[in-house]
Amino acid sequence: MSDRPRDISSEQPEASSLSDHQQALAELRNLLLAPEQHKLDHLTERLDNPALHAQELGQVLPEAIKLRSSQDSKLTESLAPIIEESFATSAQKSPQVIVDIIAPVMGPAIRQAITNALRTMVQSLNQIVEHTFTAQGLKWRLEAARTGKPFAEVVLLHTLNYRVEQVFLIHRETGLLLYHVALDAVAVQDEAMVSGMLSAIESFVRDSFGGDSDKALDYLQVGELSVWIEQGPAAILACVIRGTPPPELRNRFQDILDTLHREHHALMGSFQGDTGPFEAVRPILEGCLQAQYKKAEQKTSPALVIVPAVVVIALLVWGYLAVREQQRWETYLNSLRAQPGILVTTAEKRDGEYLVAGFRDPLATDPAAFISQAGLDPESVRNRWEPYYALSPEFLLTRATAVLRPPESVHLEFREGKLLVTGSASPEWIGTARSRAPTIPGLNEYPLEWDVAVDYGPLGPPKREVEAHRVPFVAGSMHLSGEGRAVVQAVSASLRKLEDTARAEGMNAHVEIVGHAPVNASTRTNRILKEARARAVWAALTTEDFPTVSFSATGAASSASPSAASQPVPGGLELGVSFRLLLSQSIDTTTPSR
Amino acid sequence: MIQKKVCMLGAFAVGKTSLVQKFVRSVFSEKYHTTLGVKVDQKSITVAGQDLSLMIWDIHGEDEFQKVRASYLRGASGCLLVVDGTRGTTLNTAVSLGQLTEEMVGKVPRVLVINKSDLRQDWEIDKEALTKLTSQGWTVLESSAKTGEGVQEAFTVLAGQLLSR
């Protein structure tokens, strides 16, 4: 260090000169190196600014990854743990995000898996049911018991044409197993060893017998199993088949092997022992797992026979019942229409039941009786009848019989459009019947003729005896002769007998004494003569006492008593008096009346 | 899992099949069964944290009447050349088979195993010969299928070489 004082005055110009030099140098530098300096500043900024760094890296990163991935797998190996860790962290922090991402993929896959499992289960159940409860199933069970084979094997033996059970995709060069698929039901053991041995055998056979590389082992038979081997440039396809496959199946295998080579050629070519990537060939390989079962005999399903048969039978039965029902219905209607006193006005089927309406005479047969006779269900027939009086002769006859109630001695019948009442009856019935006759419904339409004789019962003979007497008179005389008096006494005797019987029967008798005269006499003379003769006899008779007999005397009408006039009289005398006996009532039975 | 094909090579009756049986199934039989053709076995092992499946092709022994078929070696990733220590000539056979392997599949990992170490007192192969082979780049190990000595090691060493390629 020097503590010598500096000469400031002399240093000042030197400093100024230096500054000028520096400035000049800077200007010179600026003139010479400005573009380079600018680039240098820009590069410095790019290096020092991370944001620019990231921006530029982002532009080249995709291309760089693509480039490096095509060269080797180092980048993949480097990124794998980072990605795994990132994924695990993300899954722990936000599991829902992962769920949302994989749900669309996993959902269908899970559904597909469940569907397949269910389908398999249903098919198994169907087979179990079919093979367990049928005669064939029992037969196979017996066979299994007899041969000692498992039942499933026996079933398979009888039902299987062929089934590809396992498929090996073998690397041709190394004999290593690239991928293997098998049916679920097939027990698989050491598929890698099987693959190796197949490859070894194939090599052995080729060396031993083939020699030519084009000729190779393509078929093995082991009991019921056969192994079909298809050769490809990089891989061998070995399919284990149970049963007898069709030759066309080999084309299928070859097609699948070709597809595998076409789609996974690079994978096979670069195979170094890692079989992980070959998971991608599974869908294609599964195409080899084919099976064909013996077609069940084309038995017509019992349902296809039974159901139509039941339908036809049901239709026939229904048709038969319908026809029978219709016939019964018509039988019923015909029966009704044939019945007198029933008039059907409406006959129809309504709401499942029959309706019959019309008019019915109370005397007609009850229609309900015909329902059962026709075979119809009484519950299914509804009758509605309006009462009326039928005018048919039989009904009128019945009705007259019911009203008149004739005794057995009286007969009612229709003849020539008239109702005839014939026979004999007591005077009481005759009187009652005559009064009731006009009340018979419908009788006004027909003439009623009475021809009923009065039946006097025990009084009949004495009555006839009395009326048989004729009192003779001398011609032109009004006095009783001797013969006349004798007849009057006979009449008295007869009246005595009559009176006894009448008394026993509780009846009264009236004797009408009728005087007669010759028809050729003048009318006035005759009338006087008749009445005189009647009074003469009346006087003779009433000399005796007849308590229950009354008498009357009258002259006969000029045109009356022809029967009495025609009666003979004794010894040349003429008819003078006759008798007419009336019991209880004076009824003229000879005059028809209505 | 990585699969590798390895071949057991050597003269007849050197103990190739016995070594495989001991390694794969841990069994040994005094009874001699000659191998006809080839027998393939598989064994999974873990080497340096890496799972590996070894497909072991136990190829019939070679003698003057029966040569090893070259087609068996195709695709092999490595081989175990087995020598019967009690028969000196089997070493020559192993060496020639090693050359055959190289011709067929190139320079693949190979391990020379001097078997029957339980009969070491009867060995015809001296240390010098082995040292010479080691100096030529061969991996030489000793084993006994009967006792199990060196068996696991032989396969493990070979597997390690397979993975390190």
Image (cartoon, helix red, strand yellow):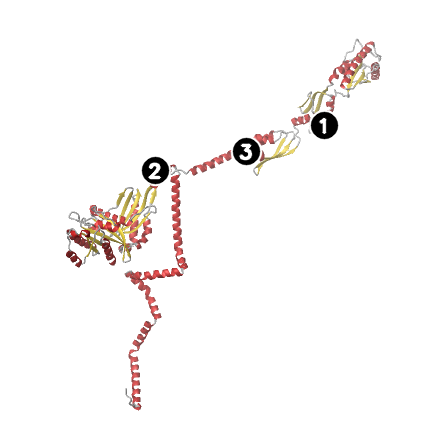
Residue A470, relative to residue A212: is it above or below? Answer: above
Residue A73, relative to residue A199: is it above or below? Answer: below
What is the distance, in whole Å, between disc 3 and disc 1 at their CAs?
A: 46 Å
The amino acid type of the residue labelled 1 equals Pro
Q: Where is residue A442 shown, x and y percent of the image?
A: 69, 29
Pointer 3: what residue?
Answer: A326
Pointer 2: what residue?
Answer: A145
The amino acid type of the residue labelled 3 equals Gln
Mark 1 crowdedness (10 Å alpha carbons): few <14, some 14-19, many ≥20: some
**Residue A581 located left or right of residue A206:** right
The amino acid type of the residue labelled 2 equals Ala
Q: Tell me, for residue A438, which label it has, or none.
A: 1
Q: Residue furthest front?
A: B121
Q: Where is residue A467 shown, x and y percent of the image?
A: 77, 15
Question: What residue do we see at 76% from left, 17% from top?
Answer: A504
Secondary structure found at label 3: helix
Mark 2 crowdedness (10 Å alpha carbons): few <14, some 14-19, many ≥20: few
Disc 1 chain ID: A
Query: Do residues under tags 3 and 2 come within 8 Å of each other at their CB atoms?
Result: no
- Picture quadrant where residue A381 is located: top right
Q: Nearer the viewer, mark 3 or mark 2?
A: 2
**Residue A246 located left or right of residue A101:** left
- Residue A69 shows in this picture: yes
Choose the circle earlier in sequence order: 3 or 1.
3
Question: What residue do we see at 27% from left, 43% from top?
Answer: A222
What is the distance, in whole Å, between disc 1 and disc 2 at their CAs?
A: 105 Å
- Residue B115 shows in this picture: no
Q: Where is residue A365 shown, x and y percent of the image?
A: 62, 29
What is the distance, in whole Å, between disc 3 and disc 2 at their CAs?
A: 63 Å
Q: Quadrant of the N terminus of chain A?
A: bottom left
